[in-house]
Image: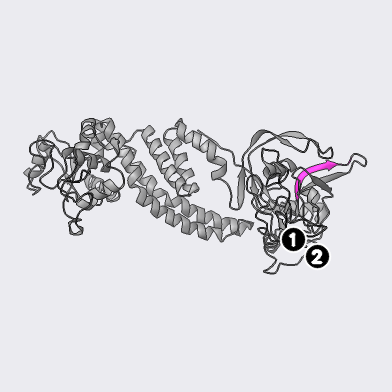
Amino acid sequence: MQQNWLILILCWIMEITMAQEVMWIEPEGNSSHQPFYLAIEPITNQEYFQFMLQDGYQNPIFWDSEGWQKKALFQNSQGECSPRTWQGCEFAPQQANQAVLGISFYEAQAYARYLGWLVPTREIWSLIQSIQLDIGPYPWPSGAQDNVTPIYLVRYCPGNLVKTGEESWQLEARLATMAMQMKAMQQKHIAEWQQLNERISKFETHGQEGVEKKQAEHLKLQQLSSQVSALLQQQASILSTLQMAELCCRLGTAYEKEGQVELALVWFQSALQFYPQFQPARQTLTKQWAAWNCPKDMLAIPGVQQVSLGSSDDPEFPLEHATISSFYLDRYEVTQRQFAEFIESSGYQADSYWSPAGLTWRGWRNRPQDWHFPTPEEEDLPISNISYYEAEAYAAWAGKRLPTAQEWEYAARGTDARKFPWGNEPPQMGQWFRANYRQVQEPYDGVLTKSKIHAFPYDRGFFGNLGMAGNVAEWTTSTYIIPESKRVLQKVKGGSFQHLWLRLHCFTFIGQNPTDAASYIGFRCAKDVPPLKLP
């Protein structure tokens, strides 16, 4: 029973790594040979062609040193390295499923290593013949010249491999092969991941119901990786923990190249579970952690030890130096549609989203003053006419927060002290305008009020956030004290459709009572980067 179970497991692994059926052979009597698996079909032209197509033929890791040195000798009549029975690097279509002939022992050995299998020795070949399997004579009767009969491969029982040990090339080849041959499984998972992600994108993260739906979908995403994890666990008895960590990194890199950062994150973290001090995984996670955890429609803003903010030329906004930790910032300003969802979900009326001061101010209100639900044409306009407290409550409901003035300015101008989010060029070039702001003389941009959040694509900050200079100004959590009256006001950053071009400078701000609501003030949200915990 145990042996049958083992055969089922190994056959499942072979189904993934080799498109052939296998036979379990256990030598009888006092034979010194350990049990092994035999691929009961010979290697075909099509299978060997795939080996060449995936550059396995050109990878020295699959060759022993003698074979690699002699590789240039294995040429056909056209001077190309391929089976000598082929015409160039091709074979007749009707020969695709026929056994490959005309390759040397070294080429067969490289192909076997590519699969993580072995070419049978002459002794093993005789053993297979002794149990009355018709596999023909040994392919290389007089040494390492081209084969004259079909080639079969063998693979030893993994349990015995642990006991007897493997040569370094076998471990390296197995590692490289697994990473290459799991591509098909990865592609399947990526396709399923994309389908699930499309469903996730239909759910808003706001409100308890949306959060629960998203959690359910993300649970399915995690289950997608479990199949590959199961295969890795089967191989864990063969590979060392260091080699398992390297394999996980290779899988993570493959997913990263496909743009599937959630799965890449899973595999790099798995690498550290196998080998906590594996530096490639630690370095990659440290470098990519913020970017890979970035929520949808937000941008990762990297931290900086010291950045210059303000202006050395304008005493109203004096120069200052700041240290900024990494954070996320909304790509766009919060829209009327998004704020309408906040109200529809009863988030506006939920006390838990309001600060004490905001809750006192809200009182009996159940929606902003002069509120109306947006028409389809208004949905992508930035929300405005709301107080600081209302913006603060929305951010808490969305699982985010409002940015500080320093964070906002750093996201807008980056590290090069530019005047405007797009650089130092003026906001107007002839009849072309980079941002939505107020013009007092011709030419005009034709926009008299706020515009849709993507209407001015050149109003783009250093890290890619849109609408940082114009359209609507934005609430921040930072405060400003008026020296004469000692009044404490909230800093509002950025210009708007009501402001002249001077207010488009990144370093400017205006002070506003947190209870004020104005048609030219909106906001965008920020979010902290989750802490990275390395073992």
At which x and y percent is residue 282? 49, 34
Q: Return the x and y of residue 165 as percentages of the image width and height.
A: 25, 31
User: Start and end of the magenta stretch?
Assistant: 474-482
**Marker disc for residue 324:** none
Residue 88 picture location, percent across and down: 21, 49
Q: Secondary structure at mark 1?
A: loop
Q: Which residue is mark 1?
A: 445
Please tell me how crowded label 1 is: few (under 14), some (14-19), or many (20+) other residues with Cα within 10 Å: some
Dominant secondary structure, magenta: strand
> What is the quadrant of residue 188 in the picture?
bottom left
Q: What amino acid is at disc 1?
A: Asp
Relative to the observer, which residue lies in front, 224 or 384?
Answer: 384
Inter-mark Cα distance, 1 to 2: 28 Å
Q: Nearer the viewer, residue 88 or 520?
A: 88
Report which residue position mark 2 lands on.
370
Q: Is residue 148 left or right of residue 262?
A: left
Above or below, 345 against 299 in this view is below
Q: Nearer the viewer, residue 492 or 277?
A: 492
Residue 478 sits in which quadrant?
A: top right
Q: Position of residue 195 (x, y in %)?
A: 47, 59
Q: Is residue 377 magenta?
A: no
In the rendered structure, the answer to whether residue 54 lies left or right of residue 424 reads: left
User: Residue at the location (42% across, 49% down)?
Assistant: 225
Mark with earlier residue (1, 2): 2
